[in-house]
Amino acid sequence: PQCRKCQLDAKKKKRASNKLKAVQYLGSKCMRCGIESNCLDIYDFHHRNPKEKEAGLNLLINTNWDSIVKELDKCDLLCSNCHKITHWELRNT
């Protein structure tokens, strides 16, 4: 058993580790503009076909790696700006 603070710290470390692995799995750069950064917060995971989306990666990032990979295979790695532009283009074309 762990105290509440230790549980939260462990969860944050697992989340950060899984996000890093996910970014690396998808090539470590935005597929649209090519930006690369050590700041993982700039990266979003864009589902190419929203109908195939089983769960948001923000929820899965705390789960096991096999579940994450299954969802990552349906995604493109985009920086936040390119992700917003992509959704704007989808809405306006």
Image (cartoon, grey):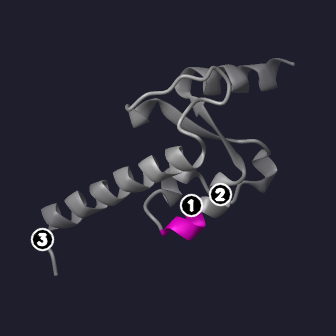
Left or right: where 42 falls relative to 49: left
* Tag 2 secondary structure: helix
Residue 56 image point, x, y percent:
59, 52
**Among numbered discs 1 and 3, the one appearing first in the sequence:** 3
Span colored in magenta: 64-68
Which quadrant of the view contains residue 3? bottom left
Q: Which residue is mark 1?
A: 68
What secondary structure characterizes most of the magenta part?
helix
Residue 42 image point, x, y percent:
46, 29
Residue 3 numbered tag: 3
Left or right: where 35 falls relative to 3: right
Q: Camera-side residue: 42 or 3?
A: 42
Q: Residue at x 56, y 32 (%)?
A: 29
Q: Three-letter amino acid code at disc 1?
A: Ile
Q: Residue at x 35, y 50 (%)?
A: 16
* Tag 3 secondary structure: loop
Q: Three-letter amino acid code at disc 2?
A: Glu
Residue 27 numbered tag: none
Q: Are marks 2 and 1 in contact (CB under 8 Å)?
A: yes
Local crowd size for mark 2, using a 10 Å CA cut-off: few (<14), some (14–19), many (≥20): some
Q: Camera-side residue: 77 or 93?
A: 77
Q: Are marks 1 and 3 in contact (CB under 8 Å)?
A: no
- Please say if 24 is above or below 42: below
Q: Which residue is mark 2?
A: 71
Residue 4 image point, x, y percent:
16, 66
